[in-house]
Amino acid sequence: MTIFDWINQMLVTKKHWDDFTEDEQKKFSPFIINRWLSMDKDFIEVVNAFQQYAIGTLESREVYNWYCDVLPKGKRFNKYIKGKRDKKYDKELIEIFTEYFECSKLQTKDYLELINKEELKEILEKYGKDKKTIKRLCK
């Protein structure tokens, strides 16, 4: 069974745990279930409160039964929220801006997210970079 099958079982079918085969029961993952259910704004508080018990403390059977009892019956669509990808910056650019802002490299990356290209070019010109280097660093 896939994660989608398990979500549908808990929200739509609400089939009894003992009706699943052992292989199906082994594929139930409380961590993944919590992750997917937390994508629903209506369930996020319930999942957040329950997850401390769901992972490690309770058995999969108990987690499944609890969600079946607590969550309302009905099909739902939850859009998966992906993590933010870090932009890759040139090492030379990070070094220049770390010196300019007098902060850590991590903070510099955050600042680079906020600066527009024109400001970026102005600062690089102040550091004596030629147009070719500026163009390469601003990619």
Image: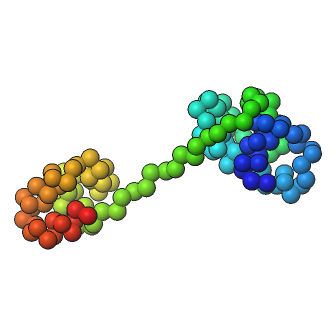
- In the figure, 122 relative to 12: above or below? below
Report x, y in % for residue 72.
Answer: 74, 28
Report x, y in % for residue 109.
Answer: 30, 54
Report x, y in % for residue 107.
Answer: 29, 50
Would you identify the image quadrant in which residue 85 lies?
bottom left
- In the figure, 100 relative to 16: above or below? below
**Which residue lies at the image location 49% right of the left edge and 50% below the top edge?**
83
**Which residue lies at the image location 64% right of the left edge and 32% below the top edge?**
43
Query: Who is closer to the viewer here, 87 or 50?
Result: 87
Q: Is residue 76 left or right of residue 122?
A: right
Would you identify the image quadrant in which residue 49 lies?
top right
Which quarter shows the N terminus?
bottom right
**Which residue lies at the image location 34% right of the left edge and 62% below the top edge?**
88
Residue 54 is at least partly visible in this image: yes
Would you identify the image quadrant in which residue 62 lies?
top right
Residue 56 is at least partly visible in this image: no
Q: Is residue 90 left or right of residue 77?
A: left
Report x, y in % for residue 73.
Answer: 77, 30
Which quarter shows the C terminus?
bottom left
Q: Is residue 77 left or right of residue 69?
A: left
